[in-house]
Image (cartoon, rainbow, N blue to C red):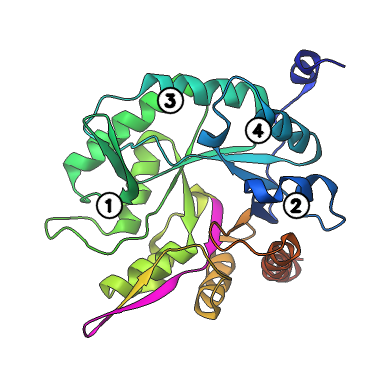
Amino acid sequence: MTHNSNQQMRVRAAIPACAGIGLRSPHHRDALNSHAKTGWLEVHSENYFGKGGAPLRILDAIRADYPVSLHGVGMSLGSVDEPDMRHLRQLKDLIARIEPGLVSEHLCWNSFGGRYLNDLAPLPYTDATLAYLVRRISEVQDFLGRRILIENPSSYLEYEFSTYSESVFLNELARRSGCGILLDVNNVYVSCVNHGWNALDYLQDISAEQVGEIHLAGHSVKQVDEQRILIDTHNGPVSDAVWQLYQCAVQRLGPVPTLIEWDADLPDWEVLVDEAAKADGYLENIYEQAA
């Protein structure tokens, strides 16, 4: 069967309400061949924007075995730059080819004047920012022909002139634009510790019906003079504090597709599968409570 006929037969596979793994290139072979499996996989969209070659062939093979979610880092929705139409066309082509269950991006800006930053910078939470993002996200969803999820950031500084809390801002953004929320529980914990916010209040505020996915990851602790700062490094296992917050999240939100992100100092594939199995344990408890 040719690639084209494969593509014609493929239909969108919904992301199940279980745990998955953020797939990075060193684990391509493991995802395809290891006896240790997970419920679904998420990839960074931009890594597969080429017209062909090994990455897309591998992703096609993976998509035959797993539901796949596409997670972007380069759309820079909060930038004052005009939308990058080449980026959007490449993403639309990838969506048509892979038929992902979910498509997501970040609540941030990371470009100015056509130059891109390595960091996902935070935004002020004001009426002006909200109106701007609603327009940008609506245009993106109209162009792609589907809903996207927007992820809450991890942040280390906040704007003095914000008039919304982050959780309420996300709710309003979802309500007005029709997007969903990707709730990164590690980011909630990191930002709440850094800014003195209350993480349980954040979870209580978030609109449960808008949350389409959860992320979990590791973070690092830095001491700067007298201040302890958490950094969203994705280079280790999920911390005990984040697992506890995740338990609170799923008790309120119910079973939600949950991703383990690990981007640096990558462990063996089996370690990632074990982390995902731990998340599945929390989800199974929710299913049992509902039975």
Q: Amino acid at mark 4?
A: Pro
Look at the magenta stretch and give its main secondary structure.
Answer: strand
- SS type, badge 4: helix
Mark 3 or mark 4, whichever is nearer to me: 4
- Looking at the rendering, the stretch of residues picked out in magenta corresponds to 213-227
- Work out whether 271 lies above or below 208: below
- Work out whether 238 lies above or below 63: below
Q: Position of residue 88 (x, y in %)?
A: 44, 24
Q: N-terminal of the two: label 2 or label 3?
A: 2
Looking at this view, is 228 or 206 the one in front?
228
Q: Which residue is mark 2?
A: 39
Q: Which residue is mark 3?
A: 87
Q: Determine the CA span between mark 2 and mark 1.
A: 32 Å
Q: Which label number is shown at residue 114?
A: none
- SS type, badge 1: loop
Which residue is drawn at the image coordinates 48% and 48% (left, top)?
Answer: 210
Q: N-terminal of the two: label 2 or label 1?
A: 2
State left or right for residue 242 relative to residue 256: left
